[in-house]
Image (cartoon, rainbow, N blue to C red):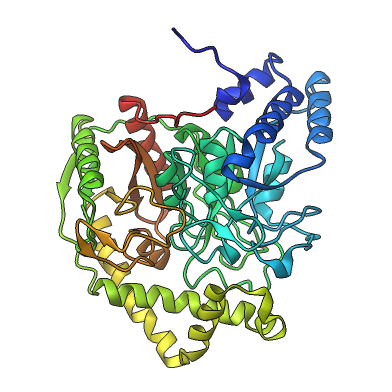
């Protein structure tokens, strides 16, 4: 029996088409999502704030359609925004009690572009305190749960956005990624997420430190159920902005043109970056994906990566950047209001304050070695594929697994293969490629050279089209 589709079953791309043809109205679409949020959000805790003006904005979008007065790329589409992203006129807490009542008076360029193209902000999604970890919970709003199994984590720090999309509480969402925060939850919830080349999506707004997105590289990007939807949202978000000193001119690409002949595409395959212990069930699905790319006509070759660091040294370098960043950005607030900070954040600030300027600058030597090794691969191959995470979703009370395949690992760092690309700034996506035998989703990391974002999207779209790997969790 074929399931009849409801509004929340449609992709964003399909919704745009239906509204443009006046078969659906923005008000119908926004109401459908608000109704679903009201019924089901309490189970997963994806949204923490709802836009009180969403219905009013939907009515205005509907009036424009009826008057044939312009139709943007996202006209009438509800968009979920991560609570780390300052949103003008809407509470933005950063997951911290100290900002529980903070209402920004400005917002980043990419969010203005979403509004300009007709997107309707549905609300703000949950994130860990200041986005500091790969799971999603905070002192204000508590834990976000995975729709595949509500005892498991969706990952983080864009866990709320991932769950909003996976649970069909929003058709598309924005996330941010400073160490895997788009790709990790995308992988663990079975959706698509893109971290583009650093600088393509401007990162400005009310940022106190205009250069703070460089150490490590922090990116904003789309989280969606389909690659086509990601290309749609990315096409709106990307583009040069003079307000961001790291913003780069784009290549004037049509990112929504996803057609590409995959025959002969050169793909490097690294099962573990030469460093990580990958669970057997994840590894099996990842190797099957590599074989599927071969079936598409790609030349796929397993490569030996030598990042020049132990997993411990690599983690220490990445963590050093984050700890110094947090100490610099929030140390003064911590001194004034220590009771408003969790023990985890307090510990990060303390570590950051102990790192000398010389030690901090020496991290650049590690970044350089990692960059050179990845670029060596990209000089020979079009793309590099690898796991996103070493395991599937785990108990939401844990920071991470302490064992993989019976071997002891660091639960804070050793289960994600995403951070290296935040050291280098290369584009990298998480593509859902199927389920393990236990029925949990696995994400394939698809990365390319700088500004190869369109090719990353095209390759992911070709795979998605050929193998139809997206599978929905069992939802109410």
Q: Quadrant of residue 46?
A: top right
Where's residue 326, x and y in %? 56, 76
Where's residue 245, x and y in %? 60, 68
- Residue found 41% across the figure and 46% down from its top: 188
- Residue found 33% across the figure and 81% down from its top: 365
In this rendering, is residue 132 above or below 181?
A: below
On the rendered image, what quadrant is the N terminus found in? top left
Residue 233 in view (yes/no): no
On the rendered image, what quadrant is the C terminus found in? top right
In this rendering, is residue 32 above or below 250?
A: above
Left or right side of 7 for 403: left
Left or right side of 188 for 345: right
- Residue found 35% across the figure and 59% down from its top: 416
Q: In the image shown, does 450 or 76 lie closer to the viewer?
A: 76
Where's residue 312, x and y in %? 28, 75
Where's residue 442, x and y in %? 33, 42
Q: Quadrant of residue 137?
A: bottom right
């Amino acid at each position: 029996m074929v399931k009849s589709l409801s509004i929340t079953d449609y992709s964003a791309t399909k919704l745009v088409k239906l509204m443009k043809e006046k078969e659906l109205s923005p008000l119908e679409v926004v109401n459908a999502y608000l109704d679903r949020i009201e019924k089901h959000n309490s189970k997963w805790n994806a949204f923490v704030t709802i836009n009180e003006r969403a219905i009013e904005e939907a009515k205005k979008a509907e009036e424009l359609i009826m008057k044939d007065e312009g139709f943007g790329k996202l006209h009438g589409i509800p968009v979920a925004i991560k609570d780390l992203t300052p949103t003008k006129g809407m509470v933005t807490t950063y997951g911290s009690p100290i900002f529980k009542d903070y209402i920004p008076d400005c917002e980043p360029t990419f969010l203005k572009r979403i509004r300009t193209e007709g997107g309707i902000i549905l609300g703000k999604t949950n994130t860990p305190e200041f986005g500091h970890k790969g799971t999603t919970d905070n002192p204000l709003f508590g834990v976000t749960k995975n729709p595949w199994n509500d005892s498991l984590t969706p990952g983080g720090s864009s866990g709320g956005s991932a769950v909003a999309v996976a649970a069909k509480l929003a058709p598309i969402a924005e996330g941010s990624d400073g160490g895997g925060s788009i790709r990790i939850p995308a992988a663990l919830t079975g959706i698509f997420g893109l971290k583009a080349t650093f600088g393509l999506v401007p990162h400005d707004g009310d940022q106190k430190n205009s250069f703070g997105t460089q150490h490590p590289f922090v990116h904003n990007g789309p989280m969606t159920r389909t690659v086509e939807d990601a290309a749609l949202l990315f096409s709106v978000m990307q583009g040069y902005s003079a307000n961001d000193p790291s913003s780069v001119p784009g290549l004037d690409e049509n990112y929504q043109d996803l057609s590409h002949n995959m025959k002969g595409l050169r793909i490097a395959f690294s099962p573990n970056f030469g460093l990580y212990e990958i669970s057997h069930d994840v590894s099996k699905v990842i190797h099957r994906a590599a074989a599927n790319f071969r079936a598409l006509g790609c030349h796929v070759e397993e490569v030996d990566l030598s990042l020049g660091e132990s997993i411990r040294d690599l983690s220490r370098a990445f963590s050093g950047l984050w700890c110094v960043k947090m100490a610099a950005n929030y140390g003064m607030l911590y001194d004034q209001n220590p009771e408003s900070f969790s023990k985890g954040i307090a510990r990060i600030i303390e570590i950051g304050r102990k790192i000398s300027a010389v030690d901090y600058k020496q991290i650049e030597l590690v970044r350089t070695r990692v960059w050179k090794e990845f670029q060596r691969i990209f000089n020979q191959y079009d793309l590099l594929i690898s796991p996103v995470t070493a395991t599937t979703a785990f108990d939401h009370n844990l920071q991470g697994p302490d064992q993989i395949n019976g071997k002891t690992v660091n639960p804070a760092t050793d289960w994600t293969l995403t951070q290296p690309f935040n050291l280098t700034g290369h584009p990298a996506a998480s593509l859902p490629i199927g389920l393990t035998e236990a029925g949990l989703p696995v994400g394939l990391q698809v990365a390319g050279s700088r500004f190869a974002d369109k090719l990353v999207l095209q390759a992911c779209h070709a795979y998605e089209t050929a193998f139809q790997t997206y599978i929905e969790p069992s939802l109410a």
